[in-house]
Image (cartoon, rainbow, N blue to C red):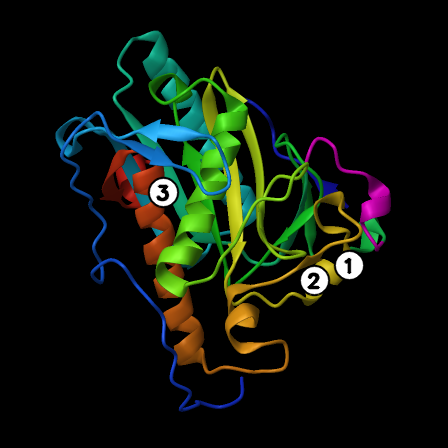
Amino acid sequence: MISTVSSSLFTLPSTSTNIKIKSNHPPNSLSFQRAACSETLSFHDSTTTIPVVNEAIKRRCECLDLYKELVPYKVAWEWQKSLVQRRCSLIEKEEDSSDTVIVLQHPSVYTLGTGSLKEHMNFDVNNAPFEVYRTERGGEVTYHGPGQIVIYPILNLRHHKTDLHWYLRCLEEVVIRALSSTFSISASRVKGFTGVWIGNEKIAAIGIRASRWVTYHGLAMNITSDLTPFKHIVPCGIKDKEVTSLKQLLFGTKTDTSEVIDSMLIDMAYESLIREFAEVFQVSLDFKSVTDFNL
């Protein structure tokens, strides 16, 4: 059964393996200091650039940091739509002064975008292995589950750039930079497709929606994910490509890791992703709790 939500605005045991991972930034450092507004950030394999602004005038971005939590998909979806509604109301009153980003994991779930086709699901939707939700985001069917970091930016693109293609490239850039700066992994874009790839394998999927230039939905990056559930679908509707995870890239397909190492990979990937998110979108992060948002 495919669920929808009302659219009112809505382990090998512990191992002694030594992991050598490169980091260009001090641990737990989430801020950047820039000297001049005349600088620009260049994108990997792209002609897109972003003007760099002084730290003191960066737009504030409230961060709901739940990256170690398994938040049910329906709950997070309703949060996003509620925040979009609030943001649009503030825009009408000319009181919009910040953006928001939600970082979390989901229990196992399949989600369908506006372009999803039934033939891309290799199961009966009335007897699906996990919950299935049809959403208003762009794109095809994908899987979310434990070990995958999901980032949902609620950004007013009027304060960035009113161009959804630019926004998609920015989300890709966040992942590409995170993999490069912390794990020395060279990722790229593939012409004609949205997402981030290592060779023929996709490590991060992206699907977005915007209401009055306020974004929601976002990106999902496989860190320590069990990739088996992807075999029950045609991920993103692309038949001739595979999916991968950070863990698989570092340890191979037949190597188990301890819970300690898995947890470390999640922590490091989160730190890198949120840092690069702040850099790419030139925002100053303000960490909040669920109660702060009154969700």
**Is 154 one of the magenta-colored residues?**
no
**Image location (x, y in percent) of residue 201:** 65, 57
| Disc 3 + disc 2, Cβ < 8 Å | no
Q: Which residue is mark 2?
A: 229
Q: Amino acid at mark 3?
A: Phe
Classify mark 1: helix, strand or loop.
helix
Left/right placement of residue 104 relative to residue 239 reads left
Residue name at image x 17 percent, y 37 percent: 34
Q: Is residue 80 above or below residue 143?
A: above
Can residue 290 be seen in the rendering of this structure?
Answer: no
Is residue 215 in sight in this rendering?
yes
Report helix, strand or loop for mark 3: helix
Please check the rendered image and state whether residue 121 is part of the magenta-colored stretch, yes or no. yes
The location of residue 269, given as percent across then percent down, is: 40, 60
Q: Residue at position x 27%, y 34% from top?
A: 283
**Disc 3 target residue:** 277
N-term-proximal mark, 3 vs 2: 2
Q: Is residue 97 above or below residue 114?
A: above
From which residue to which does the magenta span run? 113-123
**Disc 1 marks which residue?**
232
Name which residue type carries label 1. His
Spatial separation of the CA atoms under disc 1 and disc 3? 31 Å
